[in-house]
Image (cartoon, helix red, strand yellow):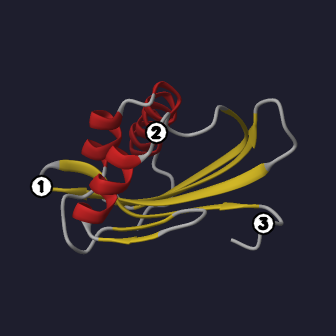
Amino acid sequence: MEINKAAILAEVTALVDRYERALGDNDIAMLDGMFWQSPRAVRYGVGECLYGIEEILAFRKARAGGSPPRTIRRMEITTFGDDFATANVEFQRIGGEVIGRQSQSWARLSEGWRIVSAHVSLQGSGH
């Protein structure tokens, strides 16, 4: 298994960048479409544990205003072969001192690359 094959790393990096843009633009349709449309998809957020795509979709729909604006401090992406990758992002909320972390597991499925699992937490928040 080849780790960080250049072409696969470029694909996944572009997807993570697209996710960040969609998050900043509160593009709910784009964000929802990047997740695996399965009851097995998982997203742990700062204050919520979402199991299955239906809970993930409901969370995004109910979230007024989207994610607080942020800048990326560090991004680490690792690909494993041609069909699996992890993305870890450290971010800082704009206008504040809050540091957060986001991890995503990406899998290439029949419908393309999708986030199958994600976790967001804030440093020192206890979450």
Q: Is the residue under label 1 in contact with that under label 2 (CB below 8 Å)?
A: no
Q: Residue furthest right?
A: 97
| Amino acid marked by disc 1 | Ser
Between 121 and 114, the residue placed more toward the observer is: 121
Report the residue at 37% width, 55% height from top. Answer: 59
Vertical comparison of 28 with 53: above or below: above
Report the residue at 45% width, 49% height from top. Answer: 5
Badge nearest the viewer, 3 or 1: 3
**Residue wearing tag 2:** 64
SS class, disc 3: loop
SS class, disc 2: loop
Q: What crowding class fits label 3: few (fewer than 14 Cα within 10 Å), some (14-19), or many (20 or more)?
A: few
Q: Dividing the image into 4 quarters, which one contains the N terminus?
A: bottom left
| Amino acid marked by disc 2 | Ala
Q: Is the residue under label 3 in contact with that under label 2 (CB below 8 Å)?
A: no
Which circle's residue, 2 or 3, is located before the other in the chain? 2
Between 88 and 67, the residue placed more toward the observer is: 67
Badge nearest the viewer, 2 or 1: 2
Between 81 and 53, the residue placed more toward the observer is: 53
**Residue wearing tag 1:** 110
Left/right of residue 114 with respect to residue 38 in the rendered view: right
Left/right of residue 58 with respect to residue 46 in the rendered view: left
Give the Cα distance between marks 3 and 1. 37 Å
x then y, percent, for residue 66: 49, 37
Q: Which mark is residue 125?
A: 3
Give the Cα distance between marks 2 and 3. 21 Å
Q: Quadrant of residue 102?
A: bottom right
